[in-house]
Amino acid sequence: MLLKPFHPGILLISGLFFSSSVFAQPTWTIDALGKEKKPVEYEEKLLASEKTGEKKFTTFKRFIQNNVTRYNYYFNANNKLNSVVERAKMAQKEDFSKLLPFYPYSLENTSSQQIELDSVIFKATGGILLHDLRSDWVDNMYLLIGKAYFYRNEMDSAALTFQFINYNLFPRKKKEDDNRIVGTNDAPGTGNLSIANKEKRNILQKVVSLPPSRNDALIWLARTFTYQEAFGDAAGLINILQNDRNLPGRLQNDLQEVTAFWFFKQNNYDSAAVHLEEALTASDNKQDQSRWEFLLGQLYEMNGEYDKASDYYVNASKHTIDPVLDIHARLNDAKMLREGADPKQLDKSINNLLAMAKKDRYENYRDILYYSAAQIAIKKPDTINTMAYLLKATSFNNPANLSYKNKSFFELGNLAYDLGDFKSAHSYYDSLQLSATDDFVDVKELNERKDGLAKLVLKIENIKREDSLQLIAALSPAERDAYIKKLVKKLRKEKGVKEEDNSGGSAPIIFGNDKNIVTDLFDNNSKGEWYFYNNSLRGKGFAEFGRKWGKRTNVDNWRRKSASPIQTGTSPGGDPSAPNAAIDSANAITAINFDALMDNLPLTAEEVDSSNAIIAINMFEKGEIFKNDLQEYFAAINEYEAYLERFPGHVKRADAYIGLFYCYTKIGNTGRANYYKNQLTSKHSGSMQAMLIENPALLNPNEKNPKVTARYESIYNMFIEGDFTAAMAEKKKADSIHGTNYWTPQLLYIESVHHIKENNDSTAIASLNSLQTLYPESPLTPKAAILVEVLGRRKEIVAYLESLEVTREEEDIIIVAEDKEPVKKTSTPTPVTIVPPVKVQPSIKQPSRRDSSAAIQPIALAAGFAIQPEIPHYVVMLLDRVDGVYINEAKNAVTRFNKESMATSKLMINRDTLDASRTMFLLTTFTDASSAITYMDKLKKAAPREMSWLPANKYSFFIISENNLQLLKTNKDLEGYRKLLNESLGNKF
């Protein structure tokens, strides 16, 4: 690789200035020509570097200059630079579960220490300029400057500095100009190029000085090119150095390091591993070496060389002083045991991790250790111990390792979910405290699963409760009483409540949770009144009863009836009078005493039926959740079939057939799918479920169905045209069949606007909230949010507006003058005669005798219409069969669009009508047809976004002059005018 010459003057001009503390004088400045200039008072004073060559450089002088430069400047600057790198290493947070970065620091962390790096540059620059340039430490100072620029992440300056060292320290022949080529043929005829310097140093030089920095600068230059992703330049330089016999042995490992980094940056990990293996001794210390050994293990693992990966993980564990690296090295070493390996090796690795967890040294890392043990246990596989280790990992609260706690909860949730323990799975998922850095989980999928599990757990608990109550009720009276008493005793003990009083009902009844407040119904010593004659006590008791039990109707078995409200069956094909039991029976057990528990037992046929109704609906809905929310089709099939087997005559059996048909279709079992299809069509022919199963596309709410789409488009047009009664009726019918999945954001929006007009704010808010939930990406969603906010403050806004006293400002008087120059107002008022104003269109320029449209020749005439492009024009937005409430919405949309554009913010919109079904917005005024067309094109382009709820076939645009407008309103020949307009001004209308 041939390196271009680099002039030494560039370095000093590129900003290597030093602080006033170095010279005890002001900082140098740069004049207009870009050359350095000393302050006036120091113009005649020469620096030591400027005197170089004036006197003989004696041995004594060399000794003094070298020692002062080394210990006063190089030593301090080098220490500062090393401190910057060390702090950057400490600031780097390593994630050993992922592929490590190549270096243990980032340039973001080093560049953030700019003050320290500037100090290095100032110190090194002072060491150069204040001393004789024949000193042995000048090249080392320049190398420090280049490194400082590198760590500041200023790669261009760093590359220029390294090139400067390369060019100026290469041996120079006499009379050789500045355009020379750096490099020589290694051996005549071989074609090999040598760019490195031979290092011939005596013992004294090795003791008292560092090696020349030119060869080091070449290595750093290759590293800089790699960071700049100039891979071609870096490769050329690396290739030359690899074949350069003059490159000293001390830099061979550094060259291997840079080569490994070059491959690593390009994701060529197999080659990177080979060269990094050769570069291990180039690491700064044992900790950096162990980190590179861990990285080598990762690279060989990615390449499938598991034996070598295991060796390096073991070495990393031995050499590191970082407990976290040690733990992950042991974990990754255990992972290298492929399938079929001796389980005893896995047990040994687990035992090692568990032994580490017992040591005080690893006290802060026990959550990581137990998590790692679980990762190995799952490979055996040993699910029981895996969950035990993960639970142990979650028991430690270490904020620094919160991600491992989250990982443990997440994997516990996954294991419990796979085992069918959905209650525990939901609990584990709910315990996650995810942050932005936790990228091991898809948050959207997790939330969907959590929501589904929350609903599923409720169904499971309801079924479990009712089954338990029925089992207890089936016992003999003696067994039942004994069991209930035992259960009451157990539950009261668990709740920390004293055992039930056996006073036989003579004990006073206590209301409230405060044990100090006791109300005796039959003995009130305070006033000598019976409880029911004391209005104050009765009121308190009534309030306490309502707080605890809620509002109860005066019917038998009210606890169970409140848990099982009767709802009218709305499923197509079902019996409308059939009871639909409530899903949740959580409030069936209300108190921990014998009577309360006995009251909840289904002891009569009616109560058993009510209990079975709860079980049936919950079993069916479990299948629905498995199918729709969790997409667990095998679990849904099991639940549906168990439901049909236990409750063959239940009202939801037709829906269960549809669910089974859908699930079997999803898993590819067409035979069973057709079986349930036939069951439905034969046993429930003519029902809506049968219609849906004949058209399976309706079962997938995410796919559009042409028939359904056409039906909702028809309803949509009814809303737009103002036929609200018919639209609401048709929409209700369609929703009963297709559900909310086919609603469109436009339909929800216009429906809510109708409800707002009718002052049905609660219904409007419900529609707007549905829009935001179902269609968060819709452009109407922000507008829906604003409407919800405004509706919430509607009364406040109306009250404010009603309280305002608005006084209309006096309108300006328009004086129509005839061809006279306007008279300027003067400070002295003079009486004038005011001509009565002539009412004209305010935004249309009134023609004078010299500016009359009659004098402008039209370019086209037809049916009385005259196309005159030079005169003022309106832009017209025509609305066809749109109800008034949506006309106002459209006007608001156009107004918003105009306000967003500074050029059109002052446009006026006037409303006019063409006939009973067509409304016009007249946007004024444009000086000619060309400017009107320009604005019309912008508005037409923005209309689908600004009025996305309005169908495109309900509005159109054209331009028109005042004369043509009046004629159009008279003859209604819009098609004729459009035809003339298109023929004259292009087919834009």
Image: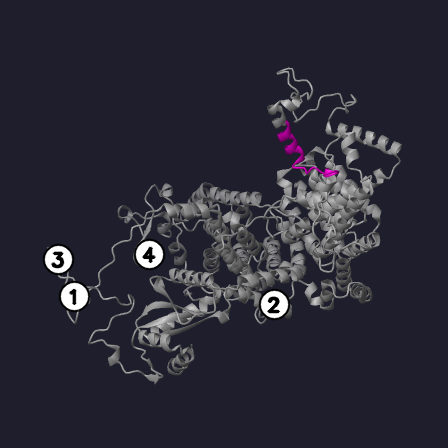
SS for dot 3: loop
Q: Quadrant of the C terminus?
A: bottom left
Which numbered disc covers residue 711?
2
Circles 3 and 2, Cβ within 8 Å, touching? The answer is no
Residue that appears at 88% across and 31% down: 478
Residue 161 percent across, percent down from the top left: 46, 56
Q: Is residue 300 left or right of residue 121?
A: right
The residue at which mark 3 appears reads as 826
The residue at which mark 4 appears reads as 35
Q: Nearer the viewer, mark 2 or mark 1?
A: 2
Residue flagged by tag 4: what amino acid is it? Lys
Of the two numbered discs 1 and 4 on the same chain, state the one appearing first in sequence. Answer: 4
Q: Nearer the viewer, mark 3 or mark 4?
A: 3
Q: Which residues are magenta?
A: 541-558
Front one among 62 and 982: 982
SS for dot 1: loop
Residue flagged by tag 2: what amino acid is it? Arg
Which numbered disc covers residue 822?
1
Front one among 665 and 154: 665
SS for dot 2: helix
Of the two numbered discs 3 and 4 on the same chain, state the one appearing first in sequence. Answer: 4
Residue 139 percent across, percent down from the top left: 47, 52
Residue flagged by tag 3: what amino acid is it? Thr
Binning the other alpha carbons within 10 Å of mark 2 as few (below 14), some (14 to 19) or many (20 upward) gives some
